[in-house]
Amino acid sequence: MENSALQIFVYHEIKAQKMFTFMCLSNEIVDENESYRGRKKREQESAWSHNSAHLISQLTRCFTANAMVGPRAWIGGLFCRTNHKKFASDNKYFNYTLTPDQEEKLQKLQGRLGVPFDETRIDHQKALQALWDAAFPNVKLQGLVSEQWKDMGWQGTNPSTDFRGCGYISLENLLFFARTYPAAFHRLLLKEDGERAKWEYPFAAAGVNVSFMLIQMLDLHSEKPRCLPGFNFVKLLGEDEDAFDILYCVAFAMMDAQWLAMHASYMEFNEVLQITRRQLEREMCLEDINRIQDLPAYNMLRQESGLCAVKENIKAVEFGSQLADYLSNYDFERDLHEHDD
C-alpha cells in the first residue's frame, strides 16, 4: 500500500482523536483567563500525546498479534464495538433473564452436551454410518471398526475412542455440517483449497476439537453463559435452535482458512485453533449480528472456494505490517502542531 494511503488513514484517526479531546474539554465551563487557557492547552497536549500512543498500540496490536480471516474481520478487530472486560465486571450481565424460548433451547442444547457417544446404541451407530455415507457416498464402509475410518481423519480404526473428549454432540456437529453445507464439508475433508502442508490436520479429529472449543468459548456448561460471546449466542439460539450447529460449521471453515493463511503444519494445530477462537469471539461480539448467518466468516461456507477468504486475510496482514512500520516512525507531536485547527 502506498505511503499516501497510510497517511490519509492516520490523518483521519488523528482528526477523530483531536475532536474527541476537544469535545471532552469543552464540557467544562469556567472563567477563561490567560493562565487557565495555558494550563488547558498543556493538558490537551498531554491528553493527545496519551491518546496517540494508545492509538499506535491498538493499531499495531490489531494487525500484528494474529492473522484474521475475512475482509470484515480485521476491521472489526481494529474498531471493536464491544468491551469484554466491561462485560466481565458488570454484574447486570450475570443477572440477565432468559426468555422462555431462550431458556428452553439452551437447556435442550446443554442436554446434548451431556450425552456420551455409545457404540452399543443403535441410533449412534446409524449416525456414524450416516456420516460415512455423507463423506464418501460411493465407498462402502466395511464395518464400524475399520481401517477406512482413518481416511476421514479419525486417529484409529474405531471412531468411538475420539468421541470421549466431547461426546455425541461432536458427531452430530459433523453430520450437520455434511448434510447442510456439503460443498464446504467436502472441501475441508478432501483438503481441496490452497497449498496444503505435508503433515495435515486429521479432519474428523479436528472436528471434535472444534466442538470442544465452541463449548468452552460460549461457557455452555454454566447455567447461563457469563461471557459476552455466550451472552450474545443465547439471543441467537432463542431465534434458531440450530445456531450452535451452524456456528460449528463457521468455526471449522475459519479454522481451515486460518491453517492455510499460517501455512501451518500438524504440530501447530492448537495454535491455529486458539487464534480461530479469538477471532470468532470478536465476531460474536459485533453489535449488528442478529443470526449466525450475519457473521462475516459465514460467507466462507457459501463460497465455492475458501481461497478468496485466505487471499483477503493475507492482504489484511500485509496492510497491518505496513501500517505498523509507518506508525512506528510517525511524528505525532509534529502533526499536532502542523494540523492544529
Image: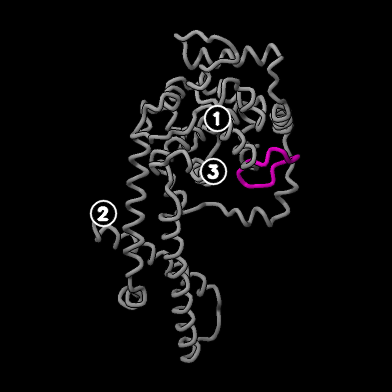
Task: Give the distance between the C-alpha atoms of the residues marked 2 and 3, in whole angstroms.
Answer: 29 Å
| Bounds of the magenta segment | 218-229
339 displayed left or right of 297: left
Question: Where residue 31 sits in the image (x, y, percent)?
Answer: 54, 86
36 or 178: nearer the viewer: 178
Name the mark on residue 277. 3
Most common secondary structure along the magenta stretch? loop
Q: Amino acid at mark 3?
A: Arg
The correct choice, above or below, for 83 with respect to 271 in the image is below
Q: Which residue is mark 2?
A: 1
For residue 219: magenta? yes
Name the mark on residue 195. none
The correct choice, above or below, for 257 with respect to 90 in the image is above
The correct choice, above or below, for 161 with respect to 326 in the image is above
For residue 43: magenta? no
Residue 196 seen in the figure:
yes
Question: Where residue 196 sits in the image (x, y, percent)?
Answer: 37, 34
Q: Quadrant of residue 314?
A: top left
The correct choice, above or below, for 130 with respect to 60 in the image is above
Question: Where residue 238 sits in the image (x, y, percent)?
Answer: 65, 31
State the SS at label 2. loop
* In this view, the mark in front (2 or 3): 3
Q: Residue visible at 45% across and 88% down?
A: 38
* In this view, the mark in front (1 or 3): 1
Task: Give the distance between the C-alpha atoms of the residues marked 1 and 3, in whole angstroms.
Answer: 17 Å
Disc with the residue nearer the chain's start (1 vs 3)? 1
